[in-house]
């Protein structure tokens, strides 16, 4: 397998089997002119930052929290590039009020955080841990006290280890346990917490956690893929039902890592196109199709044999109040006859500007995925629930004068404006992320924050991008340069 760049989303090793060689074509025209007519966002546009529990909270053994798959995975030598772990992270379990003050200080109206399942249910099921739930109750209250709207993600990859021991998402029962967890959380918080995101980037968890082994639970078993995909979709549907039964006036959505899949050109272009379609089916359609249409793309058939039961797809196809879209970069794909999947990562076009992961910095991809959802999936309301960029990888201090980040954000927000003008119902944008945090298998070598943190002292220092984002959130006017 050949890999260019260090991308977690490098999909070269994905053993899809011939089954994924679909023929339907990568949708979405390559939009190049992203100059919006107006640079003004509407007054009610939601401005926020996004974080995830495991990447920020630390306090892993505090107040009865049980271990998650990431607690186990991160401790295995070699799994995290800098040998670090998330036992402290940004210390946000203890210092959540500092985080809230930073969010308020940036004039942001919304905060997307995730809830740790194993704080609420230490083994993933059974008796609720009241101290764990209390933490989120306090966080929600602290946000509301500052006029910040909380958006909670129920699953951002940190499955309770207790459930992994029983097969994790490959076990259908996990979908049912997930609904119980949703029920427990909404019962406690549903009076104040109204915006819910069920899953974060299920494709990443399914593929990197179960096929490539680069994320927790660290499995490399292609045979699990269909089960994990379907049980996550099923759990999502069941959790949506549980939330709506548990409280009224909720906005329920889910977040996907949507990527345009672009075949490499050259003499093998037609074959590369097939590989790219295969990836598109797994990465994008295997999540969008069941949710919006109650079907799976045909490329998934072989994986799903014996997995989908009667009535499941009806449960999966729930109405949603918004779709969360995370976007960082497009995927370039080529055929590779030496790989069992025949799919490999291709290089971005010659001369393309690259991010720290070696991915093409391409705001047109954001336009493309938003517009695809509009055209093909009934123009739902959307929120960009993650977008942002990392400093160059390294162990040194963060770059405080992060002009590159400002440029990145401005260009992607231009794409959001252009998408809105094209008819996409995009209602908000959450920058990833508030404070430099634990970037999964990259540990602390990748820094995405608007705010830097000295890991020795915990002191937080806003970067130039923090002030820039604040001015934007306060005026809604995107600077021209
Ligand atoms: C993801 C996750 C985040 C990452 C972020 C930066 O998109 O992978 O939701 O947890 O930290 O994307 O890579």
Image (tube, rainbow, N blue to C red):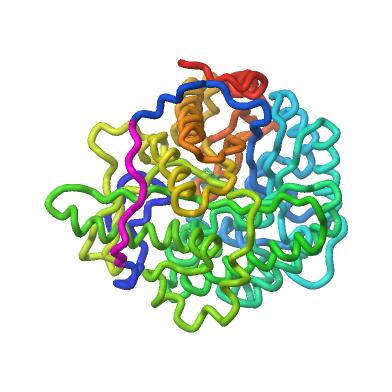
Q: Is residue 371 visible?
A: yes
The part of the image, by quadrant, that contains residue 431 is top right
Position in image of residue 62 (x %, y %):
80, 53
Which part of the image, by quadrant, shows the N terminus? bottom left
For the point 47% across and 73% down, which residue is it?
226
User: Is-magenta flag for residue 31?
Assistant: yes
The part of the image, by quadrant, that contains residue 46 is top right
Front residue of 444/370: it is 370
Front residue of 452/317: it is 317
Position in image of residue 275 (x %, y %):
28, 60
**Magenta span: chief secondary structure:** loop
User: Is-magenta flag for residue 239?
Assistant: no
Residues drawn in magenta: 21-32
For the point 54% across and 54% down, which residue is it?
201
For the point 75% across and 38% down, which residue is it?
149
Q: Is residue 209 visible?
A: no
Position in image of residue 202 (x %, y %):
54, 58
Count up the numbered dots.
0
Give above or below for 18 relative to 159: below
Left or right: residue 199 compared with residue 146: left
Front residue of 364/462: it is 364
The part of the image, by quadrant, that contains residue 111 is top right
Position in image of residue 104 (x %, y %):
75, 27
Residue placed farthest to the left in the image?
Answer: 267
């Amino acid at each position: 397998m050949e890999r260019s760049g260090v991308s977690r989303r490098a999909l070269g090793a994905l053993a899809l089997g011939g089954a994924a060689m679909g023929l339907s074509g990568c949708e979405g025209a390559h939009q190049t002119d992203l100059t919006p007519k107006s640079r003004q966002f509407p007054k009610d546009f939601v401005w926020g930052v996004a974080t995830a529990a495991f990447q920020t909270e630390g306090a892993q053994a505090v107040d009865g929290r049980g271990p998650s798959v990431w607690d186990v995975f991160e401790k295995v030598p070699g799994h995290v590039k800098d040998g670090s772990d998330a036992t402290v992270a940004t210390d946000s379990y203890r210092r959540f009020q500092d985080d809230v003050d930073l969010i308020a200080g940036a004039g942001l109206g919304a905060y997307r955080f995730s809830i740790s399942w194993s704080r609420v249910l230490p083994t993933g099921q059974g008796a609720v841990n009241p101290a764990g739930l209390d933490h989120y109750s306090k966080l929600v209250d602290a946000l509301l006290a500052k006029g910040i709207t909380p958006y909670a993600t129920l699953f951002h990859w940190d499955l309770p280890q207790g459930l992994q021991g029983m097969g994790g998402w490959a076990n259908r029962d996990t979908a049912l346990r997930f609904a119980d967890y949703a029920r427990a959380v909404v019962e406690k918080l549903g009076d104040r917490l109204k915006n819910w995101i069920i899953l974060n980037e299920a494709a990443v968890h399914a593929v990197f956690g179960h096929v490539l082994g680069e994320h927790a639970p660290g499995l490399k078993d292609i045979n699990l893929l269909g089960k994990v995909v379907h049980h996550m979709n099923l759990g999502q549907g069941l959790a949506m039902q549980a939330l709506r039964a548990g409280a009224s006036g909720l906005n329920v959505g889910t977040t996907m890592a949507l990527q345009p899949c672009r075949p490499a050109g050259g003499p093998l272009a037609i074959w590369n196109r097939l590989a790219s379609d295969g990836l598109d089916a797994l990465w994008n359609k295997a999540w969008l199709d069941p949710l919006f249409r109650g079907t799976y793309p045909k490329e998934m058939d072989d994986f799903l044999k014996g997995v989908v039961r009667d009535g499941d797809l009806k449960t999966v196809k729930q109405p949603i109040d918004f779709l969360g879209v995370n976007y960082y970069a497009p995927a370039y794909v080529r055929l590779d006859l030496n790989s069992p999947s025949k799919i490999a990562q291709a290089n971005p076009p010659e001369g393309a500007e690259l991010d720290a992961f070696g991915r093409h910095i391409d705001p047109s991809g954001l336009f493309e995925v938003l517009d695809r959802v509009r055209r093909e999936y009934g123009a739902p309301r959307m929120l960009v629930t993650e977008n942002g960029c990392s400093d160059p990888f390294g162990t040194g201090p963060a770059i405080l004068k992060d002009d590159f980040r400002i440029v990145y954000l401005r260009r992607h927000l231009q794409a959001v404006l252009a998408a809105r003008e094209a008819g996409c119902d995009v209602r908000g944008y959450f920058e990833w992320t508030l404070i430099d945090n634990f970037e999964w298998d990259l540990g602390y070598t990748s820094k995405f924050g608007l705010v830097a943190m000295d890991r020795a002292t915990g002191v937080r220092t806003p970067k130039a991008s923090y002030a820039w984002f604040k001015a934007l959130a306060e005026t809604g006017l995107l600077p021209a340069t």
